[in-house]
Amino acid sequence: MDDSVAESKAAARRWTWRIPAYILLPFYLMLIGVLLRYAVYVRTTNHWGFTDYLRSLCVYDCNAYERLSLNGYEGRPSGFDKGDANNWAFFPLYSIFVWAINRITGLSMLVGGSIFTCLTTVWAAILSWPLFEGRFRAYFLFCAFLFLGPLSYYFSTLYTESLFILLTVAGFVLLKQRDYLAAGATGALMSATRSTGLLFAAAILIAAFQNHLRAGGGARQFFRTIWKRTDLMLAVGMVPIGISVFAVYLWFHSGDALAFVHIQRAWGRVFQDPFSNLWATLVVQFQTYHNYQSISTDLAFGIAAIVGIALSAVMAWKGRWDWAIFSLFGVLLPLSTNTYSMIRFVAGLAPILITASLLGSRWKWLFYLLLPTMLIADVFLLPVWTGRSYYMM
Amino acid sequence: MPPVYRPKLWHLAAIVLIAIFDLGVLYMVLSPRVSEDYRAYYITRTASCFPRLISGFYPLGEPLSFVPGSHNGYDLDTTRWCGFKPTSSTGIRSFGDYGVLKLKFPDPGEDLLLTFTGWVNSDKPRQVEVLVNGDRVGTLNFTGYPRVNGKIIVPATVVAAGKGEMEIRFNVPRTGPPGTNGEPVNLELRMESLRLVPLSEAPPGMLGAKKAESPPPFPRSRRGS
C-alpha cells in the first residue's frame, strides 16, 4: 500500500466524479464490520434476528443512553443496589440526536441510534483525513480500528464515543485551518456530549499560540496582544456553553446544577490524585489479591491509562501540543475519579487513536501485523462484549 | 512579519452575553435547591447512604423476612430505608457506616420486643450498635461468621418518641481505609429477619431479653447524618 496519495494541486482542482478513497474506505470498512460481527453473532447464537443482534450489542451505558433518549432525565435517584444512581451522569447531546432521529424517521431508539452511531463514525473518519497529512496507511489503520478493531463495539452501538470523536476531529481540523470561532462552537457541542469536551478550550488556546509562532510572531507578543484576540476569547468562552446549558437544565430538574458530578458517587467516583489512583490500580492485583497469573480489570484499566499518557507524550514530542494537552487531561480527568472504564475513555480520544495509527503504520510489517490482529480480536471479543465483560465496560 | 490582530465589536458583545450567562450558571452552581438527605449524601458526603422512598408499612408482631421466597413472614420490601442493599438469599446487606430500617405501625403504648437474625462478613469479633429512634438500645457482639439472634426490649418511651414510626439503625464499624472510590470499607451486616412484638404478646420462649435503660444513657447519634 502506498503511504501517500497526495494529489498535485492541478489534479485537485480538476472536477471528477470519482469519489476519493478516503471517503469510500470508511463506508466499506463500516459495512464489512457490521456484516462480519452480525455473521459471528449468527454463528455463535444460531439466531438471525438483526434487531436482536443490535440488542445484544447494547450493553452497559448503551442502555442508559437508550433510556435517556426514550424517557429523558430521571427523578430522584433510586438505581443500583445502593439506590443512589440515575441517569444524570449522562450528557445529553448524543441522546438528543437519537431522540430526533426517532421522531423524524420512526425508527426505534436502538435501530436509529445504532445507524446514527455507525454513520457518525464514518463521518468522523472522513473528517479526520486532513489530520493524517496524506499518510493513507495510517488513515487506513485508524479506520480499521474504528470499524474492525477490538473496540469497534463503542462505534457501532449507542455510546457517545462516535459523536465525541466526530466533534473532536472537526475541532482539530478547524484549529488547523485557524477558524477559532467554528472550533469554539464545536467545543460547545463537545462539552454537551462529554465532560472532557471542556478541555477543548485549552486546545484552542494552545493551537492559537502555535499558529501565532508559525506565522512569525513571538511568544511575548502573543500574550501582549491577547486582549485584541476577541475571536480567541469568544472561541474559548463558547466551549463551556454545552456543559453550562446542561447544568442549567439540571438545576431546574433536580435543584443541583452539578448533579452530573455529584451523582458519580453511585459509580464510586470521587476526585482524588490521578497518579495515586493509577498506582493503586496497577498494584492492587499483586499486593491485595496476590494474582500474578492474569490481567485483572484494574490492571487493564491502569495499562490503558499509561498508554493514553504515553501517546500524549508522543504528541508533545511531535510538536502537537494542542492534541497532547487535550489528550493528557482527557485521560487524567477520568483517572482522577477512578480507573473504571479507562479503556473506553482512552479509545474515545481521537488524537490518541490518530497518533497510535501514525505509529502503527510507520513500519509496513507492523501495519500488516496489526490489521489481522485487530480483526481477529474484533471477532473473538464479540461474545466477551455481549457477555458484559468488565474489561470493556 | 508578525501577525496583526484587530478586535471586533460583535465578538465583544457575544463575550459579554456569554459572561452574563456564565454568572447565572455560577449562581446556580453555588446555590443548589436540594433536600437535606441529597445534600448530605451527594454534596457534603456526610451521609453514607441515600434514603429510599418507602411506605414503612409493617404489621406489628409479624416476622419480617429479608430473604426472598423464604415464606416465613411478611416479605414486602417496605421497611428497607437507607444503607441496606436489596433483599437476597443472604438477606439485606449493609453498606457504609450504618443501615436503617423504618417501620410504621400504631404505637401499642407498651415496651416492644425486638428480635432479629443477622451475621457479618468478618471472621474477627465485631460490635454493631443498635439505635431505635436515635437512642441506643443495645450492642450486638459478633464473634465471627456465625449468626447472631438479637433480642432487645425497646422501652415504651423510645417507641412513643417515634410518633407512629420506628427507625432502627445499625451502626457498623469501619474495617479498612478508603479505596480508590473514596468510600471507607465497613463491616457488612447481613440481616435475614426481624420481628417486633408488644412485650405482653411475646411468646414465653422469646422473653429474657435485656431491656434498654430508660431514659437511654446515650444521646441521639449524629454519626454520619
Image: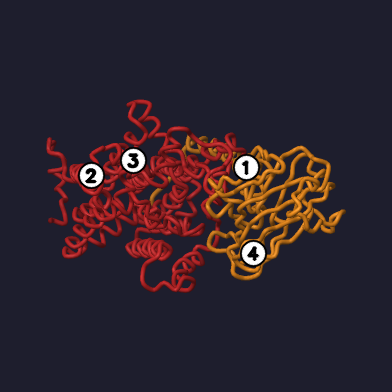
The answer for how far apart the CA atoms under marks 2 and 3 are is 15 Å
Q: Give the x, y percent position of residue B31.
A: 66, 42
Residue, x 43% and y 63% (percent of image)?
A: A298
Residue at mark 3 shares a chain with residue at mark 1? no
Q: Which residue is mark 2?
A: A46
Q: Which chain identifier belongs to the red chain? A: A
Q: Amino acid at mark 1?
A: Tyr
Q: Residue furthest front?
A: B204
- Residue plotted at (49% across, 43% down): A240
Colour assigned to chain B in the rendering is: orange
Q: Tag on residue B166? A: none
Q: Which residue is mark 1?
A: B74
**Left or right of A199 on screen, residue B56:** right
Residue lying farthest to the right in this orientation: B215
- Which type of secondary structure does the marked residue at label 4 adopt? strand
Q: Are marks 4 and 2 on the same chain?
A: no
Tag 3 subunit:
A
Question: Which circle marks residue A55 in the picture?
Answer: 3
Q: Secondary structure at mark 3?
A: helix
* A277 relative position to B157: left or right: left
Say which residue label 4 marks.
B174
